Structure formats: structure tokens, C-alpha cells
Image (cartoon, grey):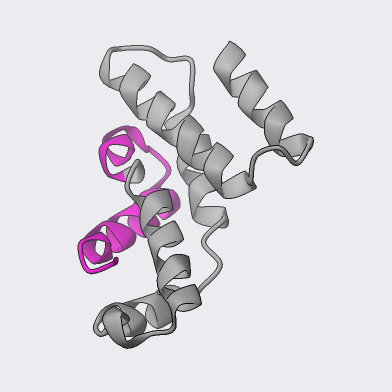
């Protein structure tokens, strides 16, 4: 919980980008949950990551097909999305909210196509 509080404080103070904080907590949550911890609610953590994805799924899917031809800033945005989705893959095994799980599964299928 100390890491979570410290991460949230770093985001609140502007020391850490919200995306980076969410990725850190999602990775920590997945690690702990896999080992039987119930400190984090996987639904909350997954929802937090998903809420930080700034582009619609359809647009990301379209861009992922030929991402090498995109401008560098767009490639970086797709990479940020992949970084948000990556910890959701193991975390998705414990998500119980059907709406969140459906979205995690949707992104899971696209993850490998992203830079």
C-alpha cells in the first residue's frame, strides 16, 4: 500500500505522469495478485488503465496495421497505449466486472500489433 500511496502522491504532485503511475500500479497489482494478495482490486486497477487510453479502439486498430509509416508522435502514443494494456493481460484473469473484462479482452487482441 505504501508503493500505491507514494505513486498516487507522485502523480498528484506532477512528478509522475498519470499514465506512468497507472502502469506502475497495474504491474504491482498483477504481481501481488498472482501471489495471492488481495491488496488491490483488479477491477479498479484495470479501469484506471483503460480510462487513460486517449484514442478510440477503432482508431488504434486502424493505425496498428501500418504503424511504421506514422509520424513519431503517433507511434509514441500507440506505444503508451500498449504500455497501459500490457499489465492488463495478466490482471485480466482476476477482473470480475463484465464491462471492464470485455474491454480488457478487446485490447488484449490488439496488443501484439502495437509498437
Task: Tell me, yes or no, whether the highlighted magenta stretch contains residue 97.
Answer: yes
Give 17 or 47, whichever is nearer the viewer: 17
Residue occupying the point 33% across, 36% down: 91
Q: Is residue 114 above or below residue 38?
A: below
Residue 72 place in picture, x, y as percent: 44, 76
Q: Is residue 58 above or below residue 48?
A: below
Quarter that holds the N terminus:
top right
Q: Residue 3, can we see it?
A: yes
Quarter of the view holding residue 78:
bottom left
Residue 84 place in picture, x, y as percent: 43, 51
Residue occupying the point 39% across, 80% down: 58
Q: Is residue 111 above or below residue 87?
A: below
Give 10 or 45, whichever is nearer the viewer: 10
Q: Residue 1, can we see it?
A: no
User: Magenta-highlighted stretch: main secondary structure?
Assistant: helix
Q: Is residue 48 above or below residue 104?
A: above
Residue occupying the point 26% across, 66% down: 110
Q: How many marks?
A: 0
Residue 27 place in picture, x, y as percent: 39, 32
Task: Tell me, yes or no, whether the highlighted magenta stretch contains residue 95.
Answer: yes
Q: What span is in magenta?
A: 89-115
Residue 101 place in picture, x, y as percent: 36, 49
Quarter that holds the C terminus:
bottom left
Residue occupying the point 42% across, 82% down: 59
Give 72 or 111, whichever is nearer the viewer: 72
Quarter of the view holding residue 75:
bottom left
Amino acid at each position: 500500500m505504501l508503493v500505491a500511496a507514494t505513486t498516487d502522491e507522485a502523480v498528484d504532485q506532477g512528478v509522475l505522469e498519470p499514465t506512468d503511475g497507472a502502469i506502475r500500479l497495474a504491474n504491482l497489482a498483477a504481481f501481488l495478485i498472482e501471489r495471492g494478495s488481495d491488496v488491490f482490486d483488479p477491477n479498479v486497477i484495470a479501469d484506471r488503465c483503460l480510462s487513460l487510453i486517449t484514442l478510440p479502439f477503432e482508431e488504434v486498430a486502424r493505425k496498428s496495421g501500418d504503424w511504421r509509416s506514422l509520424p513519431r508522435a503517433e507511434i509514441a502514443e500507440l506505444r503508451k497505449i500498449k504500455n497501459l494494456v500490457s499489465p492488463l493481460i495478466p490482471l485480466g484473469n482476476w477482473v470480475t466486472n463484465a464491462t471492464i473484462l470485455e474491454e480488457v479482452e478487446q485490447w488484449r487482441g490488439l496488443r501484439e500489433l502495437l509498437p
